[in-house]
Image (cartoon, rainbow, N blue to C red):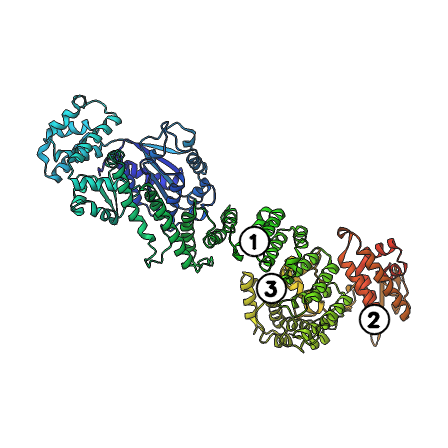
Amino acid sequence: MIDSDLSSETLSWLTGTWLPKGPPVTVIAGFSGVGKTATVAQFAGMVTCPTIVETVPAGGYDLDELVFNVAGALEEAGRPEMADHLGERYPQAFVRALSQPVLIVLDDFQELLDAAGHPPGSMQTIISAISSRIPSLSGRLLLVGNRIPEEEPWLEGTRIRRFNPPPAHEASSLLGRLLADRGIDREVSPHLRQDVANWLGCNPRAIHALVACLMHDSLDQLIRLDSDSWETRDETISAELVRQLEAMFISRTVRHLTDDARTLLDALSIHRRPFTKDAIERVRSQVQDVNAARRELSSFFILERQGSRHSLNRVSREIARSGLSLDARKLQRFHSLAGDHYKRHFNVRQNDTRSDYSAEFIEARHHLVNSDRESEFHDIAQQFRSRLQVMYNNHGSVPGDATAQRRLLATLWAVLDGTQGPHAGLRLLFAKLLLARSASGDDLLAYRQVTEASRGSKRNDVWILRAKLAAQLDGSTAARAVVDQAEGALPAGMVVQIIQVAAKSLAEKGALREALRLLDGVSQEVLEQRGSWVIHQLQATLLSHLGRDVEAIDTLVAAFKRLGLTVGGTSRLVEEGAMIAAASRNHKALRRIQLAILENDGIDGTEELSTLCETLMLKIKGNFSAAAEVAASHSHYVTLRAQQAFCHLCENEPEKAVEAFEGTNSRHFLGWLKAVTALSMINARNNNRYADWIDGYAREEGVTPAEVTDQYLLERWDATARTLGPSPAFYYPELPASLTGLPVDLRRLQHGDSCLIGVAVEKVRFGVPYRKPGIKAGRESNTVRIYRPNGDIYIAGYVQREGDQSVSNYNFSGSQIGAVGDQASASNNTFQQFSATSGSDLASLASELGKLSSALRQRPAEERDEAALAEIDAAAVAAAEGDEAKTRGHLARAGQWALTAATAVGAGVAAAWIEGAIGL
């Protein structure tokens, strides 16, 4: 290497200006052999960021291979960003890689150019995308070549630096050193060395080639090869002339090689990438002394070593390949040797457990196919696929380590690219790795893989993932098509889960009605399967989320009656039905569910489920103490234990709630309640003994324990009500003021808007019951807000004490209270009197409310207020039980919508009661 002023200047600019300031893309262009590669290699060794140098082989790369090699080299250097986004378009993948401080060098870039000097269109797009990101990218792309045009649109925004040969005196010094190193300094007298350097255009590589020739030929013999150029040596020498001279010198050197050295050169010229010592050893069978041949090639500057890898001088390689093209048998034989070199990684008998051989696999495929051993390649590909299957237990298990995931992803990409056949296990694993990586477009790539994997496969996990992705990416029509195909290819029992996953995926993207239609179209054969209860359960969940609670309960009860408790999992049907009924305060539906349960009397689980219904009926009446006592009778049933703990909390008994949790396993709805219990102990008892319950819930949520506050728990209770799975609001839809410390009871259904609108959520304190404020005494009047279910009462109070006498007056405005106390007055009040009601009146009301509810539920879903309907149902139950106070409370909460509806349908008795309850 020449330490020329130009080389030093280029290094100084690269390290001091370009690397810290940009632009992102720079081109170094210059004659072949002038030292570009050596200077860039020196620069790469000076930088501290991850650096990769990719040399484009003669004839160029397929762009996919180039991008793949760059991504793999970056990953090995500790920068996986590009490998993680190979599923994106290549420009985006390069931009992501260069978003980090890395250096990518593409040497011999001219090999990607066509005759007009243009790279492939996609490469132009890559360079343009990177160049346009000035100054946002911290990474750098360096293009090194000898044919890069300066005026092209795709180069806009790049910096181009010309790299010319060193000065004549430096080239002359190089010639002298090389002659001395070889012991042939007499071959060129000192006074001729500058003339010789000028003749070769001061090109370092051409000077190396000349010195190699001088080991066999005299200078006069070499000058006679092109005497005309020698005569004009003091004039400007063209790059083409220098290349021709270099090629002539190397050709003469090659002719002087021993047979072994020439054979080794030919065999190694097959390699497209730098190769290891093993590739040289593979030629041992073709030569007498492979080590002597290697030393000979090195002495003539033909074989170069960089670290643990070797490569050929470019011109030497081109000469060798040109000769091989005329000998098809020899070409095939040397491709075969190279194929053996790369295929050794895929020998099924070896015990190597590595799976990240993607680059080696690509090279093995190239050489084996070109040596007419394509069938053998398919065999080793199948062996390698089988080996991967065995390594991952044929279950598509994704490695836990992120680096291992990326390497396996790269290997599977190479193994499966262009292959036919399902290869279900590997394609499933490939799809899971893509989804784990989660780059842009990875979900579509994964969908294609599992679609291909499902062809002829009966693997349930393949079909399940396909159904899920079809619903997520293509919608209900595609999901229906997958289900139809599954019904034709798989046993009916396996189809159940596929339908469930497809419908749930549709629902999770907001297509609840489409999901419901998918479930409604399930065949009778599938519904007859033992596991079909999951379909009915999901149907009910979707109905409830659409505000159709009565239909949801009917669906669950009908399915339970058909399947009974003898089928595993069906207890979930009545449990879910009971929870939906309790959320809507539908006492009648709860009783109906309980009767359906009791029809299975004597079967394990009957008592527990019946007790759950009894507990929920007490709970919706507000009788938390009795509900807790009933729930405690079956301590092994976790759902009852949770209800017991909740009721104790509502009774301000957190210690008893703690006792109820003893021995329970962690579930999400239990984690939330345990966190509420821990905060209740802190707030009400100043006892932080159960802070680890808060820590556990924080881990479930992916937040810090400090974030799990009273307000956080309340907002999570409200927000998760719309999720399809079990949520705190599903099991505990009502939070009374005695639990939250807020002035109002809260009720959250699976449908409808948040119930926290207008609520001062920052004031919630679990375990500290709300206390109605009293009347403050003093010499100034005080306004006190007293809360009650159907509105506010504003009271102005004034108390004056004089000696032993007191004068009190209370002035009420806008209430149902008259004047109370000395010198009191009442104003702006409308009094509505309610007399004691007979049982027959309540019975009549109950009958009319039932009819009213039935009539209103015939309306379209968008015209129904499910919360108000639930209150009407609850009022009907209370009226039937003769509880006037509760009847009025439910009717008050049913509100104006219920009054308008009752009036519209002519339910006069119900309308009058509602009107009275809401104070009109």
Q: Residues within 10 Å of mark 1 (few under 14, many from 20)?
A: some
Q: Nearer the viewer, residue 884 or 330?
A: 330
Badge 1 marks a residue whose secondary structure is helix
- In the drawing, does residue 98 fall left or right of residue 682? left
Q: What amino acid is at disc 2?
A: Glu
| SS for dot 3 | loop
* Element type where label 2 sits in the image: loop
Q: In which quadrant of the rendered view does residue 301 lie?
A: top left
Single out the mark in the foreground, 1 or 3.
1
Nearer-the-camera pick, 258 or 670: 258
How far is mark 1 from mark 2, CA to CA? 55 Å
- Tally of numbered discs: 3
Identify which amino acid the numbered label 3 is placed on: Thr
From the viewer's perspective, is residue 726 above or below residue 45?
Answer: below
Q: Earlier in the sequence, mark 1 or mark 2?
A: 1
Instruction: Indicate the amino acid at tag 1.
Output: Ala
Q: Which residue is mark 3?
A: 709
Identify which residue is drawn at 14% across, 26% down: 223
What residue appears at the point 77 percent right and 55 percent down from the top-left corner?
865
Farthest-out residue, left: 186
Q: In the picture, which quadrant includes the C terminus? A: bottom right
| Place of residue 348 in the rendered image (x, y in percent of width and height, measured from the top left) | 34, 56
Q: Can you tell which quarter of the image residue 731 is in?
A: bottom right
Depth check: 618 or 817 in front? 618
- Label 2 Cα crowd, 10 Å radius (few <14 / some 14-19 / many 20+): some
User: Do tag 1 and tag 2 residues touch (Cβ < 8 Å)?
Assistant: no
Apparent side of residue 309 relative to residue 775 in the rendered image (left or right): left
Q: Which residue is mark 2?
A: 881
Read off the residue under disc 1: 489
| Placement of the N terminus among the 4 image quadrants | top left
Q: Earlier in the sequence, mark 2 or mark 3?
A: 3
